[in-house]
């Protein structure tokens, strides 16, 4: 039986959050699409005689994302008419780009594998259809929104790779602050072209996004997957399609070139329509818009504004701060979260230097304790603070906890000023009020008990009151120690260090 290799290419549309639409002066923004047909003008509605004008900011942002993905920037580019009829396309054609996109030939690395990017071109978004009962309604509020379309080379070979590519691309768009790229709101729409080819009988031509057969091999047709509104759905849709095509080919069936939608309820792809080819769209240059000349000066000017991007930040968080790779991926996934973590680390070192319990300079402290500090930070940030943020649906940017206060909080834990239970209570209060952790600890008497003499008296009393349990521990029953430790924490109202109680108990129960 033939061995099939998945050949996957991605097409990703992302709405740019420019102030105005692509070819008119109507305000742009997802929040302006809430009321149907309110944010439109004669240009959006394609009234006869209306002439478009190019949104300069959209062009600059397309160049910017191309630079972020190490793409070539066209010095001459133009717009084209993509002709097709659909109710949400009022002109009967879409202003897009065909043979001269603004950016081309780029690359994005996913888990050490380079994914070639064929092109990113700029176009206008269409309107939307609302279906109900026996009728469909047309809403043109979205029509004319600036839209960039990224096309990869067909070099992705798994559903996991497809999902990770989309995730990192979304992060880059957000770091550049050119798109919110929210899939659930339709601001970013991912489509996968999936085919299965026999191993060793084809080659992929990078940069032109084509797959070519070797000798007399006949390529299997590709299927385009649409209607995908989450990364999880993307992964499941591609996985399902690979299994569906494998089963069909093994049964001798021919794969039809078509568009299939993802049915979330049934967890399967369903046929929608026969897939169009480029020739079907009858592209020709847009006669109402002039060609564009992109200068070297503009490219250098935009290049100078590039921030540190997620792949580079991920590498630095691991090498400079010592975060575990999986923790670093979580922190870097959100620009505000990464900034919060980095500021907290900087503040933490400052706090530790100022405390008498810590010896050394900033560099010496970090060299000596860096790995332990990043572990404490990631544990409390990812496991604990995330819990409050998710429950209250609050972003890290809007949290009342500042990086300075979080760093102060970590110093309390690091120097054993509070135990784990008290630290959780302090963090919860910080989240609610924004108060400093030290004031919360003092006002609520949550500081850890360090008086060894007092703890020994408490432990002696617990052993006297639980002689049978103490004897069970001496006889080798480890669970008895847990009970006695629990009594110690109860007697100290949770303020003692559990390790200290355990140590004293073991010493006295020898």
Image (cartoon, rainbow, N blue to C red):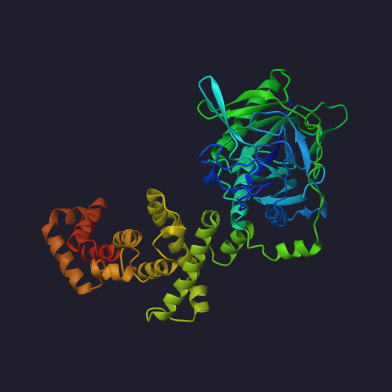
Considering only vertical position in the picture, is 340 above or below 357? above
Q: Is residue 282 visible?
A: yes
Is 189 or 266 nearer to us in this picture?
189
Relative image position of residue 339 (x, y in whole percent)? 52, 63
Q: Residue furthest right?
A: 215
Relative image position of residue 114 (x, y in whole percent)? 72, 49
Q: Quadrant of residue 258?
A: top right
Is 160 or 269 nearer to us in this picture?
269
In the visual, does 26 lie left or right of 480?
Answer: right
Q: Residue furthest top?
A: 252
Point 33% across, 67% down: residue: 435
Is 30 or 418 nearer to us in this picture?
30
Point 23% across, 63% down: residue: 505
Considering only vertical position in the picture, is 75 above or below 8? below
Relative image position of residue 305 (x, y in whole percent)? 67, 64
Relative image position of residue 49 (x, y in whole percent)? 74, 39
In the visual, does 345 lie left or right of 20?
Answer: left
Considering only vertical position in the picture, is 469 above or below 422? above
Q: Is residue 475 visible?
A: no
Image quarter in which the N terminus is found: top right
In the visual, does 107 lie left or right of 346?
Answer: right
- Total marks shown come to 0
Point 78% across, 65% down: residue: 297
Considering only vertical position in the picture, is 249 above or below 436? above
């Amino acid at each position: 039986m033939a061995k099939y290799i998945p050949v996957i290419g991605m097409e990703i549309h992302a709405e740019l959050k420019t102030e105005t639409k692509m070819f008119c002066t109507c305000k742009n923004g997802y929040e302006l699409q809430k009321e149907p047909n309110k944010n439109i003008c004669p240009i959006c509605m394609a009234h006869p005689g209306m002439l478009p004008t190019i949104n300069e900011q959209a062009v600059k942002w397309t160049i910017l994302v191309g630079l972020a993905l190490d793409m070539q920037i066209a010095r001459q580019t133009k717009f084209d008419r993509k002709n097709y009829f659909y109710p949400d396309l009022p002109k009967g054609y879409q202003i897009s780009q065909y043979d001269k996109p603004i950016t081309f030939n780029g690359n994005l690395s996913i888990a050490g594998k380079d994914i070639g990017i064929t092109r990113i071109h700029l176009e206008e978004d269409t309107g939307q259809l609302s279906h109900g009962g026996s009728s469909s309604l047309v809403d043109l509020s979205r029509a004319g929104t600036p839209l960039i379309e990224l096309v990869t080379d067909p070099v992705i070979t798994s559903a996991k790779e497809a999902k990770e590519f989309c995730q990192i691309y979304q992060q880059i768009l957000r770091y550049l602050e050119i798109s919110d790229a929210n899939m659930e709101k339709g601001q970013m729409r991912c489509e996968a072209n999936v085919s299965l080819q026999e191993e060793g009988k084809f080659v992929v031509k990078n940069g032109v996004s084509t797959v070519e057969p070797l000798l007399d091999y006949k390529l299997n047709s590709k299927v385009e997957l649409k209607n995908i509104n989450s990364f999880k759905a993307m992964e499941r849709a591609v996985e399902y399609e690979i299994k569906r095509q494998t089963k069909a080919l093994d049964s001798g069936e021919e794969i039809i070139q078509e568009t299939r939608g993802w049915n979330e309820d049934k967890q399967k792809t369903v046929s929608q329509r026969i897939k169009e080819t480029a020739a079907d769209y009858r592209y020709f240059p847009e006669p109402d818009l002039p060609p564009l000349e992109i200068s070297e000066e503009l490219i250098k000017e935009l290049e100078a504004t590039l921030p540190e991007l997620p792949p580079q930040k991920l590498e630095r968080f691991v090498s400079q701060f010592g975060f575990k790779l999986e923790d670093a991926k979580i922190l870097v996934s959100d620009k505000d979260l990464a900034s919060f973590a980095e500021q907290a680390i900087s503040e933490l070192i400052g706090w530790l230097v100022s405390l008498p319990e810590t010896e050394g300079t900033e560099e010496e402290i970090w060299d000596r304790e860096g790995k332990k500090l990043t572990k404490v930070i990631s544990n409390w940030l990812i496991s604990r603070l995330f819990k409050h943020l998710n429950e209250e649906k609050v972003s890290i940017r809007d949290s009342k906890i500042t990086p300075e206060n979080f760093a102060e909080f970590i110093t309390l834990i690091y120097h054993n000023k509070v135990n784990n239970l008290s630290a959780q209570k302090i963090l919860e209060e910080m989240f609610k009020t924004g108060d400093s952790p030290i004031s919360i600890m003092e006002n609520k008497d949550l500081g850890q008990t360090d008086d060894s003499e007092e703890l020994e008296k408490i432990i002696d009393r617990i052993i006297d009151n639980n002689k049978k349990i103490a004897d069970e521990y001496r006889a080798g029953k480890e669970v008895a120690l847990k009970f006695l430790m629990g009594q110690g924490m109860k007697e100290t109202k949770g303020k003692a260090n559990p390790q200290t109680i355990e140590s004293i108990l073991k010493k006295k129960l020898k």
